[in-house]
Image (cartoon, coloured by chain):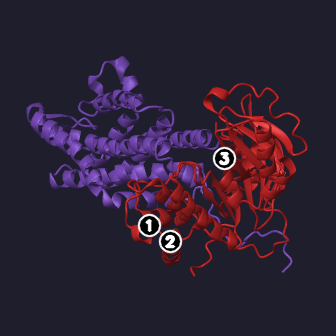
Chain colours: A red, B purple
Amino acid sequence: MAAVPFAPVSHPSAASLISARGLTKRFGDFTAVDAIDFDVAPGESFGFLGPNGAGKTSTMRMIGCVSPISGGTLRVLGLDPAADGRRIRAQLGVVPQQDNLDTELTVRENLLIYARYFEIGGPDARRRADELLEFVQLADRAESEVEPLSGGLKRRLTIARALINEPTLILLDEPTTGLDPQARHLLWERLYQLKRRGATLVLTTHYMDEAEQLCDRLVVMDQAKIVAEGSPRELIERHVTREVLELRLPADDQAPLDGRFDGLEPLVERVEQRPDRVLLYTSDGEAAVERIHERGVRPESALIRRASLEDVFLRLTGRTLVD
Amino acid sequence: MTAPAPIRDFLVLPLPGMGARHLIERSVLVYRRIWLVLVSGFFEPLFYLLGIGFGLGAMVGSLPGPDGQPIPYQLFVAPALMATSAMNGAIYDSTFNIFFKLNFQRTYEGVLATPLGVVDVAIGEIAWALIRGTLYAIGFFVVMFVLGLVASPWAVLTIPAAMLIGFAFAAVGMAATTWMRKIQDFDLLALVQIPLFLFSATFFPLSTYPAELQTIVQLSPLYHGVELMRDLTLGHVGPWLLVHVAYLAALGALGLLVCSRRLGRLLLK
């Protein structure tokens, strides 16, 4: 097995790696992050889930010490970003939302020069670059130019680059946005490897499946605020039912519900009408299907699925994540 | 072990500005593969020297040098073109290249996620641009030497003088680039660079300008570079050279300061 590509934290009981209290970011009159509190423990995989514009990236940039805070307090690795930004950044691995790879250099050179920015050079840098290229399965492209690489390969290189300094804390801002499903799954698998080896990951996403796959714990952000916090399982249990019955009604039957789904409590806890379907939140999907059949409702399709974080978000904000 | 915070203390951080050398390493790495681009910038002043210095110079003959003694026209023009080559080299690199890295490649966002800061970026990029300017100036100096246009041992000092000119123009060029929003803004650059080149006592002495215009010419940073170079190649050395040095150094320092501030404002929002 290749060397561990990050610095494992020796004391799981140690103080929080990140601690924010009343953390605020304003751009002029606009408040991007509005007095949020959160803590990230060593070895934890922590997510910010929310739609575009919720304040996730602003929060990540403050943690990454490239954006001064407007209010509240923020400690990263026990240090104040305003005073010790350089020292903190020396121990961070940052995967930005938009790739900013050096397109004037080759794949390997990208890693070597990035190592230099961390004062790592010579044989150390070369060994590390080779290990990381192996880790992200790019070893055979080491001498390639960066520009012709696909989005997924660029992303993998960006992740390798973020690990060049054996970071204590890895920040990933929408790591798989814009990738095709195959590329996403490969990235998830690599990130899961990091997590399994004890890395502390902080990531933002607006993909539910990503949050469920990668996060031990997450906060749901909406309009600059944190609206819920917990593990994916806890959030689902707390805010929605175990199962969801999704009904697609015939195209000529998109009219108001006319009370067709009223009075199904306690079997159906809540009914949500979306433009293209009706969602019934229930503890027992099979039973709910039977009940609506008894009432003469004939949907085009009926799907029973496990409730997801998407449902949590819809419940908390009344909106879907990706509009 | 009972240390509460998982901070790794063995990390040695460079002082602010020291990280600039890694930006220079980056440029070296980039240009190692596209060195031909570098070579092209050397020929422009050379063509001017041959075309104007020798071609037109044959008709001009000689004109009064800095100390009043007549000198051949080539000897008058060559140091001015050496100053120009240092300026051009520095401007090439500090404008288009910086614009591309700042706005399209987002290179500096990657750099700023590491321990390096905006001061490192500003110093590192300006230093590379001045190195490029200096390389052109050295190439040009060799040509001057071969053509017998070096009249004094003091001329050795034209190399550090070229570095100073490169510094001033690289810093101002990069500072100006931080305000550029689109490629078309670079048309303005030509509008500044060409008059600087033509009217900085490059091709004719300051005394030929009308009195009112002489003051304006003396504000041109290239004028100070040209005078510095000319006096050094002709061995006409005295304390007045320090005025040129001070002017160029101050301009460079100001550009560097503005650059760091602007990068901070643009990238560390």
Residue behind mark 3: A206
Other residues around mark 2 within 10 Å, as few (<14) / some (14–19) / many (≥20): many
Q: Does B214 sit above or below residue A42?
A: above
Q: Residue at x 49, y 57 (%)?
A: A152
Q: Do labels 1 and 2 share a chain?
A: yes
Secondary structure of the residue carrying tag 2 is helix
Residue in front for this viewpoint, A134 or A243: A243
Give the foreground label among 3 and 1. 3
Q: Which amino acid does label 3 sit on?
A: His
Mark before the other along the chain sequence, 3 or 1: 1
Q: In this view, does A175 lie to the left or right of B4?
A: left
Kind of residue sitting beneath label 1: Arg
Give the spatial CA distance, label 1 vs label 2: 7 Å
Q: Position of residue B142 (x, y in %)?
A: 22, 55
- Disc 3 element: loop
Label 1–label 2 contact, CB within 8 A: yes
Q: Are dots 2 and 3 on a single chain?
A: yes
Mark whose residue sits in front, 2 or 3? 3
Q: Measuring from the top left, give residue B250's x and y in whole percent.
A: 51, 40
* Residue A129, numbered circle: 2
The residue tagged 1 is: A108
Disc 1 sits on a residue from what chain? A
Earlier in the chain: of badge 1 and badge 2, it is: 1
